[in-house]
Amino acid sequence: MLIRHLVEDGVLHLALLRDLDVPSRAAAALQIETLLLAHRPRLVRMQLPTADPSPASLSALARARRMCEGLGIPLTVVGPAPVVGPSGAA
């Protein structure tokens, strides 16, 4: 699995589970396209797995942006979630 997703109040939340390489880029783009067409969200929020994503991850992001633009869906991109320690501190 390359992508985790959740649909909440018309927002499709996508998260790349790992930094992509060239072979996984096409599979991730296909998963994103399938989710967009199945859910037709009003907004997409995409979370990248690292602060310095690979060229393949950026390529998948660019493809997602083009798909969203074609469907008239705004796309928001966020960085990785901070790691929380056992005491709750980042």
Image (cartoon, rainbow, N blue to C red):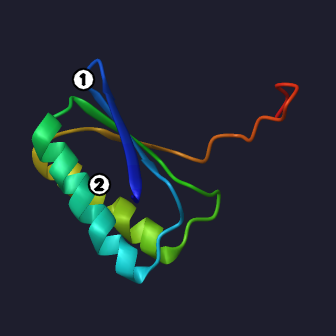
Residue placed at 36% from the left, 40% from the top? 5
Q: Secondary structure at mark 1?
A: loop
Residue placed at 38% from the left, 60% from the top? 61
Whether residue 1 is situated above or below residue 44 in the rendered picture: below
Label 1 neighbourhood size at 10 Å, few (<14), some (14-19), many (20+)? few
Farthest residue to the top: give it. 9
Measure how far apart labels 1 and 2 are at the Cα level: 18 Å
59 with respect to 31 (left or right): right
Which quarter of the figure is the N terminus placed in?
bottom left
Is label 1 or label 2 in front?
1
Which of 71/80 is in front?
A: 80
Q: Which mark is residue 35?
A: none
Q: Name the kind of residue labelled 2 in the image.
A: Arg
Q: Name the kind of residue labelled 1 in the image.
A: Gly
Query: Which x, y percent locates residue 71?
Result: 12, 45
Q: Which mark is residue 10?
A: 1
Whether residue 22 is situated above or below residue 59 in the rendered picture: below
Q: Secondary structure at mark 2?
A: helix
Residue placed at 77% from the left, 35% from the top? 84
49 with respect to 36 (left or right): right
Which quarter of the figure is the C terminus placed in?
top right
Query: Which x, y percent locates residue 9?
Result: 29, 18
> Of marks 1 and 2, which one's residue comes earlier in the chain?
1
Label 2 neighbourhood size at 10 Å, few (<14), some (14-19), many (20+)? some
31 with respect to 71 (left or right): right
Quarter of the image for residue 81 reads: top right
Q: Which mark is residue 65?
A: 2
Quarter of the image for residue 12 reads: top left
